[in-house]
Amino acid sequence: MPRNRVQRLGAIGLISAVGLVATAGAASAPATGSQLAANSARASSQIAFISEPPAGGYCGLVYVMNADGSRRHRLADGPADECAQEWGPAWAPDGRTIAFVGNSKIYVTNANGSGQRRLTHTAASEGSPAWSPDGRRIAFTRYRQSTGEIYIVNADGTGQRRLTRNGAGNFAPVWGYFAPVWSPDGQRIAFVSRRDGNLEVYVMNADGSRERRLTHNAVRDEYPLWSPDGRRIAYVNNLRQVYVMNADGSGQRSLTGNAARSVAPAWSPDGQRIAFVNDGVNVINADGSGQRRLSQDGAQPSWSPDGQKIAFAKNSDIYVMNADGSGQRNLTRSNRRESSPLWSPGRSSAG
């Protein structure tokens, strides 16, 4: 991997603090009870995360570990003290492969770190990789200055093409805040654009056709995330509240509806609940009922594939807890800054 450092660090540093990147991967169909059990049985129970030095600007490295904190290893090539500017890990749907960003380029590697290859080879900066649900394609952003466009590439690096074309720029910066998000059936991609001067949620077909604007609000709308059944989209309104709407943009309503700042929605695998951050990790039913706090001071929730546990970041470490908030454990206990946990979706070949 290239050893040169990337200088644009300000926005990247916010990823660790806000933690809204990990959800921008491939979605899956809503899991039934038997499917959740199968997920639990076949999942390798691995978690990808970002590790940084204890101080200084962003210098993140992607790591992978077992869900009990064991067998921790750096994903990419190079010594652990190298500032490789890695971020944005995205698990392939089968859990065997991970796409990530290294020095503003898209890479793919096996979950055990072998077979690393670079997918993009342009002079532009790139980021926010997101796997299609069938594992054959990866959507990503390519940006220049403050504008960006969404591209797609086959998982082997072939067939790269541009999906969005807008002079005002799709506000999908390399830092991942407005990453492309696949629908569970792989037919559509949600994204955020500021083409009218305000951040709004859009959706398009996976070939870039039939773009549609879903939100029309005076405040910013961002961080869209499809429900597991593809019928709804959760998003954040004005960086303050978690909203849900139907996939066609109708039925927009606030789930959290309180004065405190609520961000980072994450659907449970069965689509019945949404974890989010509001003075810690919280959970709420998808209809807006039953809100409760699971952990103080936690952020960046990520559900296990069976829906029984939630990984999250807290006090510069990675924790895991049961879905009811019990059994919290510190997995990393490091003197580094650990953030952005992302649970593997299925079986992995990592050894």
Image (cartoon, helix red, strand yellow):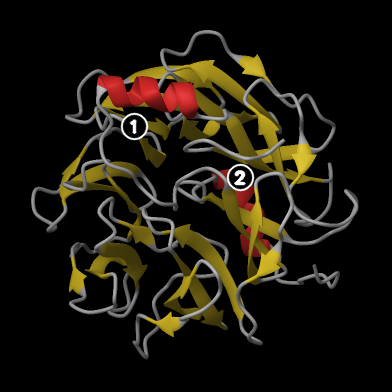
The image quadrant that residue 299 belongs to is top right
Residue sitting nearer the eye, 280 or 46? 46
Q: Residue at x 62, y 58 (%)?
A: 100
Q: Is residue 90 left or right of residue 65?
A: left
Using a 10 Å C-alpha cutoff, classify the residue at mark 1 as few (fewer than 14 neighbours), some (14 to 19) or many (20 or more): many
Q: Is residue 8 left or right of residue 246?
A: right
Residue type at tag 1: Pro
The image quadrant that residue 319 belongs to is top right
Point out the tag, 2 or 1, that comes first from the N-terminus.
Answer: 2
Considering every residue shown, the one lying at the far left of the view is 250
Residue sitting nearer the eye, 93 or 171? 93
Q: Is residue 80 left or right of residue 237?
A: right
Q: Compared to 73, does 31 lie above or below?
A: above
Q: Residue at x 24, y 26 (%)?
A: 32
Residue denoted by label 1? 269
Q: Is residue 171 left or right of residue 331?
A: left
Give the alpha-carbon distance from disc 2 to disc 1, as whole Å. 25 Å
Residue 327 % position (x, y): 55, 8
Secondary structure state at the residue bearing disc 1: loop
* Residue 249 marker: none
Q: Compared to 127, does 73 lie above or below?
A: above
Residue 62 % position (x, y): 71, 49
Residue type at tag 2: Ala
* Residue 17 marker: 2
Using a 10 Å C-alpha cutoff, classify the residue at mark 2 as few (fewer than 14 neighbours), some (14 to 19) or many (20 or more): some
* Residue mark closest to the camera, 2 vs 1: 1
